[in-house]
Image (tube, grey):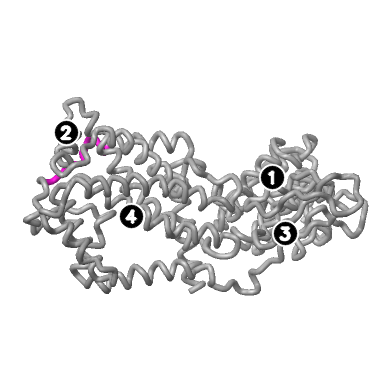
Amino acid sequence: MTQVLSSLRAADEALSGAFDHAFAPAMNPWRHLGALAFLCLVTCVASGIVAYALYDTSVAGAYASGLRLQNDPLRLGRLLRGVHRYGADASMLLTLLHLLREVVRGHFRGVRWYSWLTGIPLLWLLWLAGITGLWLLWDERALFSVTAMAEWLQALPLGADLLARNFLTPDALGDRFFSLIMFVHIGLPLLLLAATWVHVQRVSLPRMWPPRALTLGTLAMLAWLALVWPATSLGPADTGHVVAQLSLDWFYLFAHPLVNALSAQTVWWLAGALTLALALLPLWRVSRAHKRAPARVDLANCNGCARCVADCPFGAVVMIPRTDQSRHPAQASVKADLCAACGICVGSCPSATPFRQIEDLLSGIEMPDAPMALLRRHLRQKVASLSGPQRIVLFSCRQAADFSALANATTAVLELECAAMLPPSFIEYALRLGAGGVVVTGCREGDCEFRLGDRWLQQRLSGQREPRLRASVAREQIEVQWCGSDMLGAEAALARLRVRMWSTTPSANITSLKESEHD
Protein backbone atom coordinates (compact mmCIF):
# COMPACT_ATOMS: atom_id res chain seq x y z
CA MET A 1 0.00 0.00 0.00
CA THR A 2 2.86 2.35 0.79
CA GLN A 3 4.26 1.73 -2.68
CA VAL A 4 0.89 2.56 -4.22
CA LEU A 5 0.76 5.84 -2.31
CA SER A 6 4.30 6.67 -3.43
CA SER A 7 3.30 6.15 -7.06
CA LEU A 8 0.16 8.25 -6.62
CA ARG A 9 2.16 10.99 -4.95
CA ALA A 10 4.59 11.04 -7.86
CA ALA A 11 1.61 11.39 -10.20
CA ASP A 12 0.25 14.22 -8.05
CA GLU A 13 3.58 16.06 -8.24
CA ALA A 14 3.69 15.58 -12.01
CA LEU A 15 0.19 17.04 -12.26
CA SER A 16 1.20 19.97 -10.07
CA GLY A 17 4.20 20.57 -12.31
CA ALA A 18 1.97 20.53 -15.38
CA PHE A 19 -0.32 23.15 -13.82
CA ASP A 20 2.76 25.22 -12.94
CA HIS A 21 3.43 25.59 -16.67
CA ALA A 22 -0.10 26.88 -17.26
CA PHE A 23 -0.29 29.04 -14.12
CA ALA A 24 2.28 30.74 -11.95
CA PRO A 25 3.19 28.35 -9.08
CA ALA A 26 1.51 30.66 -6.56
CA MET A 27 -1.70 30.61 -8.67
CA ASN A 28 -1.75 26.87 -9.26
CA PRO A 29 -5.38 25.83 -8.55
CA TRP A 30 -4.28 22.27 -7.75
CA ARG A 31 -2.56 23.65 -4.63
CA HIS A 32 -5.62 25.62 -3.53
CA LEU A 33 -8.36 22.99 -3.74
CA GLY A 34 -9.45 23.45 -0.12
CA ALA A 35 -9.43 27.24 -0.38
CA LEU A 36 -11.35 27.15 -3.67
CA ALA A 37 -13.94 24.80 -2.14
CA PHE A 38 -14.36 27.26 0.75
CA LEU A 39 -14.67 30.18 -1.69
CA CYS A 40 -17.45 28.37 -3.57
CA LEU A 41 -19.20 27.57 -0.29
CA VAL A 42 -19.13 31.20 0.78
CA THR A 43 -20.39 32.20 -2.68
CA CYS A 44 -23.32 29.80 -2.24
CA VAL A 45 -24.12 31.22 1.17
CA ALA A 46 -24.00 34.81 -0.09
CA SER A 47 -26.10 34.11 -3.19
CA GLY A 48 -28.47 31.96 -1.12
CA ILE A 49 -29.21 34.85 1.24
CA VAL A 50 -30.39 36.94 -1.73
CA ALA A 51 -32.34 34.03 -3.22
CA TYR A 52 -34.09 33.42 0.11
CA ALA A 53 -35.53 36.93 0.02
CA LEU A 54 -37.11 36.10 -3.36
CA TYR A 55 -38.29 32.59 -2.53
CA ASP A 56 -41.85 31.57 -1.67
CA THR A 57 -41.74 28.78 0.93
CA SER A 58 -45.05 27.20 -0.02
CA VAL A 59 -46.15 24.23 -2.10
CA ALA A 60 -47.96 26.47 -4.53
CA GLY A 61 -45.27 29.14 -4.84
CA ALA A 62 -41.97 27.22 -4.66
CA TYR A 63 -41.81 26.21 -8.31
CA ALA A 64 -42.97 29.64 -9.52
CA SER A 65 -40.22 31.31 -7.45
CA GLY A 66 -37.51 29.41 -9.30
CA LEU A 67 -39.21 30.05 -12.64
CA ARG A 68 -39.27 33.82 -12.02
CA LEU A 69 -35.51 33.86 -11.47
CA GLN A 70 -34.97 31.69 -14.52
CA ASN A 71 -37.02 33.98 -16.80
CA ASP A 72 -35.84 37.33 -15.41
CA PRO A 73 -35.54 39.59 -18.51
CA LEU A 74 -32.51 41.38 -17.04
CA ARG A 75 -30.82 37.99 -16.51
CA LEU A 76 -29.94 38.96 -12.96
CA GLY A 77 -32.14 36.16 -11.65
CA ARG A 78 -30.47 33.72 -14.05
CA LEU A 79 -27.07 34.92 -12.81
CA LEU A 80 -28.09 34.56 -9.16
CA ARG A 81 -29.57 31.12 -9.58
CA GLY A 82 -26.73 29.85 -11.75
CA VAL A 83 -23.97 31.10 -9.46
CA HIS A 84 -25.73 29.47 -6.51
CA ARG A 85 -26.18 26.17 -8.34
CA TYR A 86 -22.77 25.93 -10.00
CA GLY A 87 -21.06 27.18 -6.86
CA ALA A 88 -22.60 24.27 -4.95
CA ASP A 89 -21.49 21.76 -7.58
CA ALA A 90 -17.98 23.23 -7.65
CA SER A 91 -17.75 23.16 -3.86
CA MET A 92 -18.57 19.44 -3.80
CA LEU A 93 -16.17 18.60 -6.64
CA LEU A 94 -13.32 20.63 -5.16
CA THR A 95 -13.89 19.14 -1.71
CA LEU A 96 -13.65 15.62 -3.11
CA LEU A 97 -10.48 16.49 -5.03
CA HIS A 98 -9.02 18.08 -1.90
CA LEU A 99 -9.75 14.92 0.08
CA LEU A 100 -8.25 12.72 -2.64
CA ARG A 101 -5.07 14.81 -2.77
CA GLU A 102 -4.67 14.73 0.99
CA VAL A 103 -4.97 10.93 0.91
CA VAL A 104 -2.37 10.66 -1.86
CA ARG A 105 0.04 12.89 0.09
CA GLY A 106 -0.50 10.93 3.31
CA HIS A 107 -1.94 13.93 5.13
CA PHE A 108 -4.25 11.90 7.34
CA ARG A 109 -1.87 10.72 10.05
CA GLY A 110 0.57 12.12 12.55
CA VAL A 111 -0.14 15.68 13.62
CA ARG A 112 -2.73 16.02 10.84
CA TRP A 113 -5.17 13.49 12.32
CA TYR A 114 -7.36 16.21 13.85
CA SER A 115 -7.80 18.11 10.57
CA TRP A 116 -8.50 14.83 8.79
CA LEU A 117 -11.18 13.59 11.19
CA THR A 118 -12.91 16.98 11.41
CA GLY A 119 -12.97 17.12 7.62
CA ILE A 120 -14.97 13.91 7.15
CA PRO A 121 -18.29 15.32 8.50
CA LEU A 122 -17.93 18.24 6.08
CA LEU A 123 -18.62 15.86 3.19
CA TRP A 124 -21.94 14.72 4.66
CA LEU A 125 -22.97 18.25 5.60
CA LEU A 126 -22.12 19.55 2.14
CA TRP A 127 -24.05 16.76 0.46
CA LEU A 128 -27.15 17.26 2.62
CA ALA A 129 -27.04 21.04 2.08
CA GLY A 130 -26.87 20.54 -1.68
CA ILE A 131 -29.59 17.94 -1.99
CA THR A 132 -32.06 19.93 0.14
CA GLY A 133 -31.38 22.93 -2.09
CA LEU A 134 -32.45 20.90 -5.12
CA TRP A 135 -35.66 19.89 -3.32
CA LEU A 136 -36.65 23.53 -2.80
CA LEU A 137 -37.09 24.01 -6.55
CA TRP A 138 -39.96 21.50 -6.36
CA ASP A 139 -39.78 20.42 -9.97
CA GLU A 140 -39.86 16.88 -11.37
CA ARG A 141 -36.22 16.33 -10.43
CA ALA A 142 -36.88 17.43 -6.85
CA LEU A 143 -39.90 15.12 -6.54
CA PHE A 144 -37.87 12.18 -7.84
CA SER A 145 -35.08 12.90 -5.35
CA VAL A 146 -37.45 13.32 -2.42
CA THR A 147 -39.21 10.05 -3.31
CA ALA A 148 -35.93 8.18 -3.81
CA MET A 149 -34.57 9.52 -0.52
CA ALA A 150 -37.70 8.44 1.33
CA GLU A 151 -37.40 4.94 -0.10
CA TRP A 152 -33.69 4.88 0.77
CA LEU A 153 -34.46 5.92 4.35
CA GLN A 154 -36.99 3.09 4.62
CA ALA A 155 -34.07 0.66 4.58
CA LEU A 156 -32.98 2.00 7.98
CA PRO A 157 -34.62 0.74 11.19
CA LEU A 158 -35.74 4.27 12.07
CA GLY A 159 -39.44 4.06 11.45
CA ALA A 160 -39.04 5.92 8.16
CA ASP A 161 -42.42 4.76 6.82
CA LEU A 162 -44.09 7.85 8.26
CA LEU A 163 -41.54 10.07 6.55
CA ALA A 164 -42.04 8.30 3.23
CA ARG A 165 -45.80 8.66 3.43
CA ASN A 166 -45.41 12.40 4.07
CA PHE A 167 -43.44 12.66 0.83
CA LEU A 168 -45.52 10.36 -1.35
CA THR A 169 -49.12 11.31 -0.57
CA PRO A 170 -50.40 14.62 -1.93
CA ASP A 171 -52.71 15.22 1.02
CA ALA A 172 -49.90 14.93 3.57
CA LEU A 173 -47.58 17.36 1.78
CA GLY A 174 -48.00 20.95 2.98
CA ASP A 175 -46.26 24.27 3.39
CA ARG A 176 -44.65 23.08 6.61
CA PHE A 177 -42.61 20.64 4.55
CA PHE A 178 -41.02 23.50 2.63
CA SER A 179 -40.48 25.52 5.79
CA LEU A 180 -38.66 22.54 7.30
CA ILE A 181 -36.50 21.99 4.22
CA MET A 182 -35.72 25.72 4.04
CA PHE A 183 -34.70 25.67 7.71
CA VAL A 184 -32.40 22.69 7.06
CA HIS A 185 -31.00 24.19 3.87
CA ILE A 186 -30.14 27.47 5.61
CA GLY A 187 -28.82 25.87 8.78
CA LEU A 188 -26.49 23.34 7.15
CA PRO A 189 -24.31 25.89 5.26
CA LEU A 190 -23.96 27.93 8.45
CA LEU A 191 -22.98 24.75 10.27
CA LEU A 192 -20.53 24.04 7.44
CA LEU A 193 -18.83 27.40 7.95
CA ALA A 194 -18.48 26.70 11.67
CA ALA A 195 -17.22 23.16 11.01
CA THR A 196 -14.63 24.53 8.56
CA TRP A 197 -13.35 26.83 11.30
CA VAL A 198 -12.97 23.79 13.56
CA HIS A 199 -11.29 21.90 10.71
CA VAL A 200 -8.36 24.37 10.52
CA GLN A 201 -7.88 24.99 14.23
CA ARG A 202 -4.65 23.01 14.52
CA VAL A 203 -2.80 24.63 11.66
CA SER A 204 -1.06 27.99 11.73
CA LEU A 205 -1.93 30.56 9.07
CA PRO A 206 -4.34 28.31 7.14
CA ARG A 207 -4.95 29.20 3.49
CA MET A 208 -8.65 29.89 3.78
CA TRP A 209 -8.83 32.02 0.63
CA PRO A 210 -7.18 31.42 -2.74
CA PRO A 211 -5.00 34.20 -4.25
CA ARG A 212 -6.89 37.22 -5.51
CA ALA A 213 -6.42 36.44 -9.20
CA LEU A 214 -7.63 32.87 -8.67
CA THR A 215 -10.60 34.14 -6.67
CA LEU A 216 -11.64 36.59 -9.39
CA GLY A 217 -11.14 33.97 -12.09
CA THR A 218 -13.30 31.44 -10.21
CA LEU A 219 -16.11 33.93 -9.67
CA ALA A 220 -15.94 34.99 -13.32
CA MET A 221 -16.16 31.34 -14.41
CA LEU A 222 -19.22 30.73 -12.23
CA ALA A 223 -20.89 33.84 -13.65
CA TRP A 224 -20.05 32.79 -17.21
CA LEU A 225 -21.51 29.32 -16.67
CA ALA A 226 -24.63 30.82 -15.10
CA LEU A 227 -25.29 33.00 -18.15
CA VAL A 228 -24.22 30.61 -20.92
CA TRP A 229 -25.67 27.38 -19.44
CA PRO A 230 -28.41 28.63 -17.14
CA ALA A 231 -29.62 26.44 -14.29
CA THR A 232 -33.19 25.58 -15.26
CA SER A 233 -36.10 23.77 -13.65
CA LEU A 234 -37.87 20.80 -15.17
CA GLY A 235 -41.62 20.59 -15.19
CA PRO A 236 -43.53 21.26 -11.96
CA ALA A 237 -43.69 18.43 -9.46
CA ASP A 238 -46.82 16.30 -9.56
CA THR A 239 -47.02 14.27 -6.34
CA GLY A 240 -49.29 11.76 -8.01
CA HIS A 241 -46.80 11.04 -10.77
CA VAL A 242 -43.01 10.53 -10.92
CA VAL A 243 -41.50 10.75 -14.42
CA ALA A 244 -39.60 7.74 -15.75
CA GLN A 245 -36.66 9.67 -17.24
CA LEU A 246 -35.08 12.98 -16.25
CA SER A 247 -31.69 14.68 -15.99
CA LEU A 248 -29.81 14.50 -12.69
CA ASP A 249 -27.31 16.64 -10.86
CA TRP A 250 -24.65 13.97 -10.49
CA PHE A 251 -22.75 15.94 -7.84
CA TYR A 252 -25.58 15.47 -5.35
CA LEU A 253 -28.07 12.93 -6.73
CA PHE A 254 -25.58 10.16 -7.50
CA ALA A 255 -26.92 8.00 -4.63
CA HIS A 256 -30.32 7.46 -6.25
CA PRO A 257 -29.07 5.53 -9.33
CA LEU A 258 -26.83 3.51 -7.01
CA VAL A 259 -29.82 2.49 -4.92
CA ASN A 260 -31.67 1.43 -8.08
CA ALA A 261 -28.68 -0.51 -9.40
CA LEU A 262 -27.78 -2.21 -6.11
CA SER A 263 -30.18 -1.93 -3.20
CA ALA A 264 -30.97 0.54 -0.45
CA GLN A 265 -29.28 -1.64 2.20
CA THR A 266 -26.17 -2.12 0.06
CA VAL A 267 -25.72 1.61 -0.51
CA TRP A 268 -26.09 2.28 3.22
CA TRP A 269 -23.44 -0.34 3.92
CA LEU A 270 -21.15 1.19 1.29
CA ALA A 271 -21.63 4.70 2.69
CA GLY A 272 -20.96 3.51 6.23
CA ALA A 273 -17.94 1.45 5.21
CA LEU A 274 -16.41 4.33 3.27
CA THR A 275 -16.94 6.77 6.14
CA LEU A 276 -15.45 4.29 8.63
CA ALA A 277 -12.47 3.61 6.34
CA LEU A 278 -11.75 7.34 6.09
CA ALA A 279 -12.04 7.72 9.86
CA LEU A 280 -9.61 4.84 10.48
CA LEU A 281 -6.91 6.06 8.10
CA PRO A 282 -5.05 8.00 10.86
CA LEU A 283 -4.40 4.65 12.56
CA TRP A 284 -2.22 3.61 9.65
CA ARG A 285 1.19 3.01 11.18
CA VAL A 286 4.25 4.88 10.01
CA SER A 287 7.44 2.83 9.69
CA ARG A 288 10.02 3.42 12.40
CA ALA A 289 12.50 4.64 9.80
CA HIS A 290 10.26 7.64 9.08
CA LYS A 291 9.48 8.54 12.69
CA ARG A 292 11.24 11.59 14.11
CA ALA A 293 11.44 12.71 17.73
CA PRO A 294 9.66 16.00 18.45
CA ALA A 295 11.58 19.23 18.93
CA ARG A 296 13.18 19.86 22.31
CA VAL A 297 13.85 23.19 24.04
CA ASP A 298 17.23 23.86 25.66
CA LEU A 299 16.61 26.51 28.31
CA ALA A 300 20.28 27.47 28.58
CA ASN A 301 20.11 28.75 25.00
CA CYS A 302 16.49 29.94 24.80
CA ASN A 303 16.00 33.69 25.27
CA GLY A 304 12.21 33.59 24.81
CA CYS A 305 12.22 35.48 21.49
CA ALA A 306 9.13 33.49 20.29
CA ARG A 307 10.35 33.20 16.69
CA CYS A 308 9.82 29.45 16.84
CA VAL A 309 6.22 30.07 17.93
CA ALA A 310 5.60 32.37 14.97
CA ASP A 311 7.12 29.95 12.46
CA CYS A 312 5.69 26.61 13.62
CA PRO A 313 3.23 25.35 10.96
CA PHE A 314 1.07 23.38 13.39
CA GLY A 315 1.05 25.47 16.56
CA ALA A 316 3.22 22.95 18.39
CA VAL A 317 5.43 25.57 20.04
CA VAL A 318 3.97 27.93 22.64
CA MET A 319 5.38 30.43 25.11
CA ILE A 320 5.05 29.73 28.84
CA PRO A 321 6.42 31.46 31.99
CA ARG A 322 10.07 30.80 32.66
CA THR A 323 10.82 27.68 34.70
CA ASP A 324 14.49 28.39 35.43
CA GLN A 325 16.29 31.31 37.07
CA SER A 326 16.91 33.16 33.81
CA ARG A 327 16.29 36.89 33.51
CA HIS A 328 14.07 36.24 30.49
CA PRO A 329 10.34 36.23 31.43
CA ALA A 330 9.21 33.44 29.07
CA GLN A 331 10.44 30.32 27.34
CA ALA A 332 9.39 28.15 24.44
CA SER A 333 7.62 24.88 25.13
CA VAL A 334 6.87 22.09 22.64
CA LYS A 335 3.58 20.20 22.57
CA ALA A 336 4.93 16.83 21.50
CA ASP A 337 1.60 15.53 20.16
CA LEU A 338 1.37 18.48 17.74
CA CYS A 339 5.01 18.50 16.61
CA ALA A 340 5.61 17.32 13.03
CA ALA A 341 9.40 17.14 13.64
CA CYS A 342 9.96 19.35 10.59
CA GLY A 343 12.76 21.42 12.16
CA ILE A 344 11.38 24.75 10.90
CA CYS A 345 11.57 26.05 14.46
CA VAL A 346 15.32 25.29 14.54
CA GLY A 347 15.81 27.35 11.40
CA SER A 348 14.11 30.28 13.13
CA CYS A 349 16.18 30.15 16.34
CA PRO A 350 18.78 32.97 16.65
CA SER A 351 21.09 30.68 18.65
CA ALA A 352 21.22 28.09 15.85
CA THR A 353 24.31 29.64 14.30
CA PRO A 354 27.49 27.72 13.43
CA PHE A 355 29.66 30.75 14.24
CA ARG A 356 29.28 30.21 17.99
CA GLN A 357 32.63 29.37 19.56
CA ILE A 358 31.59 26.19 21.30
CA GLU A 359 32.42 22.72 20.11
CA ASP A 360 29.21 21.11 21.36
CA LEU A 361 26.81 23.47 19.59
CA LEU A 362 23.31 23.69 21.09
CA SER A 363 20.52 25.99 19.98
CA GLY A 364 17.51 27.14 21.95
CA ILE A 365 15.35 24.53 20.23
CA GLU A 366 16.75 21.38 18.67
CA MET A 367 15.69 18.30 16.73
CA PRO A 368 17.13 15.36 18.75
CA ASP A 369 17.50 13.24 15.60
CA ALA A 370 19.32 15.99 13.68
CA PRO A 371 21.12 18.38 16.07
CA MET A 372 22.80 21.53 14.79
CA ALA A 373 26.18 20.31 16.10
CA LEU A 374 25.94 17.31 13.79
CA LEU A 375 24.97 19.46 10.81
CA ARG A 376 27.93 21.79 11.43
CA ARG A 377 30.34 18.86 11.75
CA HIS A 378 29.10 17.24 8.54
CA LEU A 379 29.29 20.57 6.74
CA ARG A 380 32.91 21.05 7.78
CA GLN A 381 33.88 17.54 6.75
CA LYS A 382 32.15 17.63 3.36
CA VAL A 383 33.43 21.07 2.37
CA ALA A 384 36.96 20.03 3.35
CA SER A 385 36.67 16.99 1.07
CA LEU A 386 35.70 19.05 -2.00
CA SER A 387 38.19 19.92 -4.70
CA GLY A 388 38.34 22.16 -7.74
CA PRO A 389 37.51 25.86 -8.22
CA GLN A 390 33.71 25.43 -8.26
CA ARG A 391 32.91 23.79 -4.96
CA ILE A 392 29.20 23.76 -4.14
CA VAL A 393 27.18 22.73 -1.11
CA LEU A 394 23.68 21.41 -1.83
CA PHE A 395 21.20 21.46 1.08
CA SER A 396 18.31 19.20 0.11
CA CYS A 397 14.89 18.59 1.66
CA ARG A 398 14.22 14.98 2.65
CA GLN A 399 10.51 15.41 1.93
CA ALA A 400 11.15 16.41 -1.69
CA ALA A 401 13.68 13.84 -2.89
CA ASP A 402 16.96 12.06 -2.24
CA PHE A 403 19.61 14.01 -4.15
CA SER A 404 22.62 12.18 -2.70
CA ALA A 405 23.39 10.91 -6.22
CA LEU A 406 24.44 14.46 -7.13
CA ALA A 407 27.37 14.35 -4.68
CA ASN A 408 30.79 14.28 -6.33
CA ALA A 409 34.26 15.80 -5.98
CA THR A 410 32.89 19.33 -6.45
CA THR A 411 29.44 18.99 -4.85
CA ALA A 412 28.59 18.15 -1.24
CA VAL A 413 25.02 17.12 -0.41
CA LEU A 414 23.53 17.56 3.07
CA GLU A 415 19.99 16.40 3.78
CA LEU A 416 17.52 18.25 6.00
CA GLU A 417 14.06 17.30 7.20
CA CYS A 418 12.74 20.51 5.62
CA ALA A 419 14.55 23.20 3.66
CA ALA A 420 13.38 25.77 6.24
CA MET A 421 15.26 23.84 8.93
CA LEU A 422 18.40 25.49 7.54
CA PRO A 423 19.37 28.62 9.50
CA PRO A 424 20.56 31.31 7.02
CA SER A 425 23.84 31.59 8.94
CA PHE A 426 24.77 28.08 7.76
CA ILE A 427 24.80 29.35 4.17
CA GLU A 428 27.26 32.07 5.11
CA TYR A 429 29.25 29.54 7.11
CA ALA A 430 29.52 27.20 4.11
CA LEU A 431 30.85 30.04 1.97
CA ARG A 432 33.41 31.00 4.61
CA LEU A 433 34.56 27.38 4.82
CA GLY A 434 35.55 27.62 1.16
CA ALA A 435 32.45 26.70 -0.82
CA GLY A 436 32.02 28.84 -3.90
CA GLY A 437 28.25 28.59 -3.84
CA VAL A 438 25.24 27.09 -2.07
CA VAL A 439 22.13 25.47 -3.57
CA VAL A 440 18.97 24.86 -1.52
CA THR A 441 16.29 22.54 -2.91
CA GLY A 442 12.88 21.70 -1.52
CA CYS A 443 9.30 20.78 -2.34
CA ARG A 444 7.65 22.58 -5.21
CA GLU A 445 6.81 26.22 -4.54
CA GLY A 446 3.63 26.53 -2.48
CA ASP A 447 3.59 22.77 -1.92
CA CYS A 448 5.79 22.40 1.16
CA GLU A 449 5.14 19.14 2.98
CA PHE A 450 5.09 21.18 6.20
CA ARG A 451 2.96 23.95 4.65
CA LEU A 452 5.10 27.04 5.36
CA GLY A 453 8.72 25.99 4.87
CA ASP A 454 9.26 27.48 1.41
CA ARG A 455 7.65 30.78 2.41
CA TRP A 456 9.67 31.20 5.59
CA LEU A 457 12.99 30.30 3.94
CA GLN A 458 12.43 32.70 1.06
CA GLN A 459 11.61 35.50 3.49
CA ARG A 460 14.68 34.78 5.62
CA LEU A 461 16.96 34.85 2.61
CA SER A 462 15.41 38.05 1.28
CA GLY A 463 15.71 39.79 4.66
CA GLN A 464 11.97 39.99 5.33
CA ARG A 465 11.95 37.58 8.26
CA GLU A 466 14.18 36.79 11.21
CA PRO A 467 16.73 35.31 11.28
CA ARG A 468 17.87 37.12 8.13
CA LEU A 469 20.72 36.24 5.83
CA ARG A 470 23.20 39.05 6.30
CA ALA A 471 23.35 41.66 3.56
CA SER A 472 27.10 41.15 3.18
CA VAL A 473 26.53 37.64 1.75
CA ALA A 474 26.66 37.73 -2.04
CA ARG A 475 23.27 36.59 -3.36
CA GLU A 476 24.78 35.48 -6.65
CA GLN A 477 26.47 32.68 -4.73
CA ILE A 478 23.09 31.25 -3.67
CA GLU A 479 20.58 29.33 -5.77
CA VAL A 480 17.18 28.23 -4.41
CA GLN A 481 15.25 25.67 -6.43
CA TRP A 482 11.78 24.44 -5.47
CA CYS A 483 11.91 21.42 -7.75
CA GLY A 484 10.33 18.70 -5.64
CA SER A 485 11.57 15.31 -6.76
CA ASP A 486 12.69 16.59 -10.15
CA MET A 487 16.34 15.58 -10.41
CA LEU A 488 16.73 17.57 -13.62
CA GLY A 489 15.57 20.70 -11.79
CA ALA A 490 18.25 20.23 -9.13
CA GLU A 491 20.90 19.63 -11.79
CA ALA A 492 19.78 22.78 -13.60
CA ALA A 493 20.14 24.78 -10.38
CA LEU A 494 23.70 23.50 -9.95
CA ALA A 495 24.47 24.33 -13.57
CA ARG A 496 23.12 27.89 -13.25
CA LEU A 497 25.18 28.50 -10.13
CA ARG A 498 28.33 27.18 -11.80
CA VAL A 499 27.80 29.54 -14.73
CA ARG A 500 27.55 32.48 -12.34
CA MET A 501 30.58 31.30 -10.39
CA TRP A 502 32.56 30.99 -13.63
CA SER A 503 31.66 34.53 -14.72
CA THR A 504 32.38 36.13 -11.33
CA THR A 505 35.71 34.43 -10.52
CA PRO A 506 38.02 35.17 -13.45
CA SER A 507 41.17 34.36 -11.53
CA ALA A 508 39.88 30.90 -10.74
CA ASN A 509 38.89 30.47 -14.36
CA ILE A 510 42.38 31.36 -15.59
CA THR A 511 43.94 28.97 -13.11
CA SER A 512 41.56 26.23 -14.20
CA LEU A 513 42.37 26.86 -17.86
CA LYS A 514 46.13 26.74 -17.22
CA GLU A 515 45.75 23.48 -15.33
CA SER A 516 43.72 21.95 -18.14
CA GLU A 517 46.29 23.15 -20.74
CA HIS A 518 49.10 21.65 -18.66
CA ASP A 519 47.25 18.34 -18.49
Q: Which residues are magenta?
A: 225-234
Where in the figure is residue 88, as x and y percent of width and height?
Answer: 32, 46
Residue position marked by numbered label 2 in the rendering = 68
Residue farthest toward the top in the current orientation of the protein: 74
Above/below status of 316 relative to 152? above
Q: x and y percent of residue 400 in the render?
A: 59, 58
Residue type at numbered disc 4:
Trp
The label number, if any, that marks residue 125 in the structure image? none
Of badges 1 and 3, nearer the viewer stands 1
Q: Which mark is residue 414?
A: 3
3D distance between C-alphas at marks 4 and 1: 37 Å
* Relative to 89, 99 lies left or right: right
Nearer to me, 422 or 95 = 95
User: Is 130 colored magenta in this rendering?
Assistant: no
What residue does disc 1 label? 310
Task: Name the residue: 58% across, 56% down.
Answer: 449
